[in-house]
Amino acid sequence: MIGERLRILRKEKGLSLTELAEKSNVAKSYLSAIERGIQANPSIQVIEKLSGVLGVPVQQILANDTAEDRKDELDAEWLELTREVANAGISKEQFREWLEFQRWRLERGE
């Protein structure tokens, strides 16, 4: 799975296997083995090098998702907004009620 995610991330960044190998200082043959699933457990040091070159957190390489799965993730602004709501002491139930009210208003055209 790591190999598949690595290949997807590499292609998303427009890098060839050779380019990623050179920029990360990891042998091309080793990267190829990771991507093909032959080397299923690369070291954390290799993962850190690759994440640095790809510009993604280590967790993104290790996580069990793809770009398709990530499209639904909340951006930083939404996350901050939810933190503000929680820090303001608004309960989940109160927020749900407010949300339902807003939906009702939108349906009525207000």
Image (spheres, grey):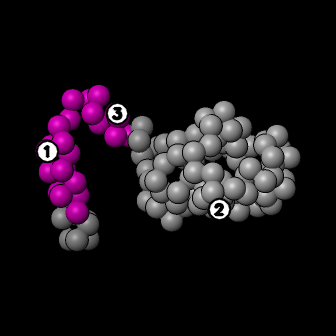
- Say what amino acid the circle numbered 3 marks: Glu
Quote the CA–CA distance across marks 1 and 2: 47 Å
What is the secondary structure assignment of the residue under circle 2? loop
**Magenta segment, which residues?**
81-103
First reached walking from the N terminus: tag 1 or tag 2: 2
| Whether residue 58 can be seen here | yes
Q: Is residue 57 left or right of residue 106?
A: right
What secondary structure predominates along the stretch shown in magenta?
Answer: helix
Report the front residue among 17 and 108. 17
Residue under circle 3?
A: 84
- Crowding near the residue tagged with mark 1, few <14, some 14–19, many ≥20 C-alpha atoms within 10 Å: few
Report the front residue among 37 and 73. 37
Residue under circle 1?
A: 93
Residue plotted at (43% across, 50% down): 74
- Say what amino acid the circle numbered 1 marks: Glu
Tag 1–tag 2 contact (CB < 8 Å): no
Q: Is residue 15 left or right of residue 60?
A: right
Residue under circle 2?
A: 36
